[in-house]
Image (cartoon, grey):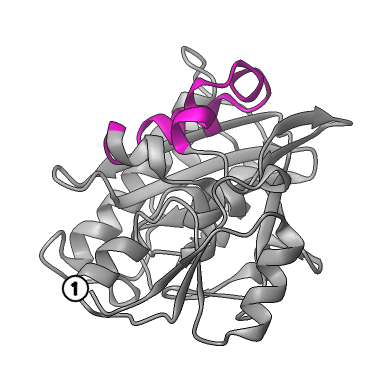
């Protein structure tokens, strides 16, 4: 690692002010991506600004059909939360599938979403659930948040405070898990809302994306058979050691079908319209 300084601000306002004054400082939450990057000397921040203890970034609250989760909430806390499991079971289930117990007990919701790793799980939930990312400065709709690989709409000194999820009628997440890292080789989150269905795919592109063709097909006919003959152009997808582009295209179709089938176990089909 390069030399860096550790800062533990007392409040969110202190953290925001410090990051604004030090262009090369980096926020630190769970550190599941940042710390390995530092160890490999791929980043050299002047300061690490620890956010994990800030009370403003904690908490789980359900009010008026919206589930609000603080940015510093860990994956393990989300997986174990009875309130989240009761409101959006698929979100709690997603958290339980992330990596391993060590990562789940240190990694945070806000850190994962801000990092926008193309194989991360949470971005698919944020996009499919039509969530709103709350920062110290503004509110950002999910559709406008994820830009490209490790790139989001966040400004350099902008911090995520919480994420608000609209409660869906039903939702399901299915993924093909990398055997070593636990990352999604392909993950598909399907959510049914009053206005239609949203299908978000992670692990199969430069960034998480909505599969609009699947959404349209499922809106007309919620049975998984609506996906018959529907496919993604393999040339859009990564071709790497984890999976070829053609295999990923097959996985997207397969795991979308499984996610739809999981929405209503034992029921042949359902119309989302």
Tell me the quarter of the picture where residue 10 sits: bottom right
Above or below, 199 relative to 159: above
Task: Name the spot of residue 150 as percent of width and height, x first.
Answer: 43, 73
Task: Name the spot of residue 127 as percent of width and height, x first.
Answer: 60, 54
Residue at image position (19%, 58%) is 247
Above or below, 34 relative to 32: below
Task: Name the spot of residue 249 as percent of width and height, x first.
Answer: 29, 60
Above or below, 255 relative to 131: above
Front position in the image: 138 or 208? 138
Task: Look at the image and tell me whether residue 154 can be seen.
Answer: no
Q: Main secondary structure of the magenta part?
A: helix
Residue ID for mark 1 = 40
Label 1 CA crowd tier, 10 Å (few <14, some 14–19, many 20+): few
Task: Look at the image and tell me whether residue 235 can be seen.
Answer: yes
Direction from residue 177 to residue 149 in the image, left or right: right
Quadrant for the C terminus in the image: top right
Look at the image and say whether residue 102 sits in the magenta stretch: no
Q: Which residues are magenta?
A: 75-101
Above or below, 76 relative to 81: below
Direction from residue 218 to residue 165 in the image, left or right: right
Front position in the image: 107 or 13? 13
Look at the image and say whether residue 95 sits in the magenta stretch: yes
Direction from residue 12 to residue 128 in the image, left or right: left
């Amino acid at each position: 690692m390069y030399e860096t300084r550790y800062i533990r601000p007392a409040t969110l306002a202190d953290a925001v002010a410090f990051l604004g004054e030090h262009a090369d400082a980096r926020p630190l939450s769970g550190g599941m991506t940042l710390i390995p990057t530092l160890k490999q000397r791929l980043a050299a921040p002047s300061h690490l600004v620890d956010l994990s203890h800030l009370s403003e970034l904690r908490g789980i609250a359900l009010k008026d059909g919206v589930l609000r989760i603080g940015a510093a909430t860990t994956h393990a806390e989300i997986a174990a939360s009875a309130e989240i499991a009761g409101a959006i079971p698929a979100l709690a289930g997603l958290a339980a599938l992330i990596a391993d117990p060590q990562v789940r007990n240190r990694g945070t919701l806000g850190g994962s979403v801000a990092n926008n790793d193309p194989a991360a799980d949470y971005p698919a939930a944020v996009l499919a659930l039509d969530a709103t990312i709350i920062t110290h400065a503004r509110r950002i709709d999910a559709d406008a948040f994820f830009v490209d690989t490790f790139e989001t709409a966040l400004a350099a000194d902008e911090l995520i405070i919480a994420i608000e999820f609209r409660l869906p009628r039903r939702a399901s997440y299915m993924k093909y898990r990398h055997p070593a890292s636990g990352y999604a080789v392909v993950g598909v989150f399907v959510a049914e809302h009053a206005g239609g269905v949203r299908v978000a795919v992670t692990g199969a592109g430069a960034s998480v994306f909505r599969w609009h063709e699947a959404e349209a097909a499922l809106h007309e006919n919620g049975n998984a058979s609506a996906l018959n003959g529907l496919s993604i152009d393999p040339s859009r997808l990564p071709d790497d050691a984890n999976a070829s582009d053609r295999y990923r295209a097959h996985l997207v179709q397969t795991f979308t079908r499984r996610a739809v089938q999981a929405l209503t176990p034992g029921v042949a089909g359902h119309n989302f319209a």
